[in-house]
Amino acid sequence: MPNPTPHHRITAVILAAGQGTRMRSRLPKVLHPICGRPMIRYALEAAQAAASEPPVVVVGIGAEEVKAAVGPEVRFALQEQQLGTGHAVLAAQDSWAGSADLVLVTYADMPLLTGETLRRLVAAQQANPGPVSLLTVRMEDPHGFGRILRGPEGGVLSIVEEAQATPEQAAIRELNVGAYCFDARWLQGALARIPLSPKGEYYLTDAVGIAVVDGLRVNAAELGDPIEVLGVNTRVHLAEAEKAMRRRINEACMLAGATLIDPESTYIEAGVQIGSDTVIWPNTYLRGSTQIGEGCAIGPNTMVQDTRVGNGCTVVASVLEGAVLEDRVTMGPFARLRKGAHLAEGVHMGNFGEVKNSYLAPGVKMGHFSYIGDADVGPDVNIGAGTITCNFSPDGKKNHTEIGEGAFIGSDTLLVAPVSVGAGAITGSGSVVTHDVEPETVVVGVPARLLKKLERGD
Ligand code: UD1
Ligand code: CA
């Protein structure tokens, strides 16, 4: 008795060699980003979810750029001339013939096709005594798609490309999605039999007709949600794909426990993580490798990029990039964090502040109009309004500022780095600190000079 669940070696082949002329771009089409990722990444991820072997990407136009963007975890096959989708699968033959039982073929310009759908396609082929299964979809607008021809018994007969379709065929609303699962050994023979089309290309879709001519069965799996077949050929499609992907990401975030006040105006890139009971207010952009903890309130009007935010933080109308916020940090409105800003637990950063490459220890308060760059700020330091670390010197160097625990930096203090202010020290309003300040002292003036030593209890 045959094993009902045979173990198949499944190789995914992703076609990405085409030019993408209609994008009118220097960038290869499959590298245009959707929700922060090159679109080919989605096709790769989906294909991987249904395959067992490392995927193969067929590259041609812009091959080097595509290779560099995709990275080393996949194999590449070069299709030097773009002679059609059948020719492209042939170009990859060395990476699947003999090493795979099933070959899953998809196109790199369909970012919304899911791994789940492709697993269904593979399952359809695993249940098929014949050599090929394909995905179909019913849609009112068939523009640009191959039409599925079925026989009187309902079985798939062949695929007719739009350019070759008769008017009756063109009226068919069952369409070829562009994802197929083949028996590998059969495919090898069939590729050699694909004829040259009137357009001078070898169409992979002709393999379907070849199976039928040989009396073999073709299985069709119908797609549930037509949004998955959205293919990107122009920048208009790119925007549609972006919108559909955004909706998908937003829904996943909400189902995982985040509240989006207005999903339509919330822009979360693929790969961003949000903890439960966090509320995202409108016009907020969460980008790159950003991670947000639980119970935060982010936005409105906020951009967070490549930043880790702890639990219970509040960020209003601010821009954060390459930063770390520990728990219960409050920020904004109108605050900016640049690369290397690290705000420890309970830090308060109010309006019109900027922090770059600096550590603000727990409990630091920085309420208004300050710039802190290349500094280490100790616990519970109070940074008065208008404080500036003058970190940049005429020799082009960035100089360090150190502020000790509990120091009180008076309003409008200029700290001319490199410089340190000792623990518990006080600088008077408007002082220009050019020399290190001893702990527990008060300095004032321009340049700041010693006014007095503090006695405990002062
Ligand atoms: C293809 C299908 C069509 C289907 C439609 C769905 C064929 C012949 N037709 O048409 O039935 O309804 O997709 O979107 O397959 N590519 C290569 N090398 C080539 C040619 C293409 O790698 O020589 C790649 C392209 O980069 C692209 C994919 O294959 O990612 C599809 O090619 P495209 O020219 O866009 O095919 P369609 O005309 O859309
Ligand atoms: Ca296409």
Image (tube, rainbow, N blue to C red):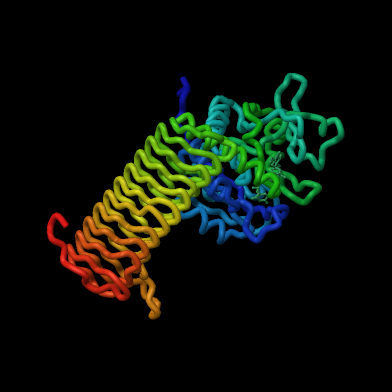
Q: Nearer the viewer, residue 143 or 344?
A: 344
Query: Which residue is found at the position 76% from the left and 35% from the top?
Result: 142
Q: Is residue 156 left or right of residue 358?
A: right
Query: Which residue is found at the position 51% from the left and 34% from the top?
Result: 260
Q: Nearer the viewer, residue 233 or 440?
A: 440
Q: Quadrant of ligand 1?
A: top right
| Residue 372 visible somewhere in the drawing | yes
Q: With respect to residue 400, does 79 lie above or below? A: above
Q: Where, by quadrant of the figure, is residue 165 drawn?
A: top right
Query: Which residue is found at the position 71% from the left and 57% from the top?
Result: 24
Image coords of residue 17 (percent x, y):
63, 53
Q: With respect to residue 96, does 123 lie above or below? A: above
Q: Residue furthest left?
A: 456
Query: Which residue is found at the position 53% from the left and 36% from the top?
Result: 250
Image coords of residue 362 (percent x, y):
27, 49
| Residue 339 visible somewhere in the drawing | no
Q: Is residue 436 left or right of residue 386?
A: left
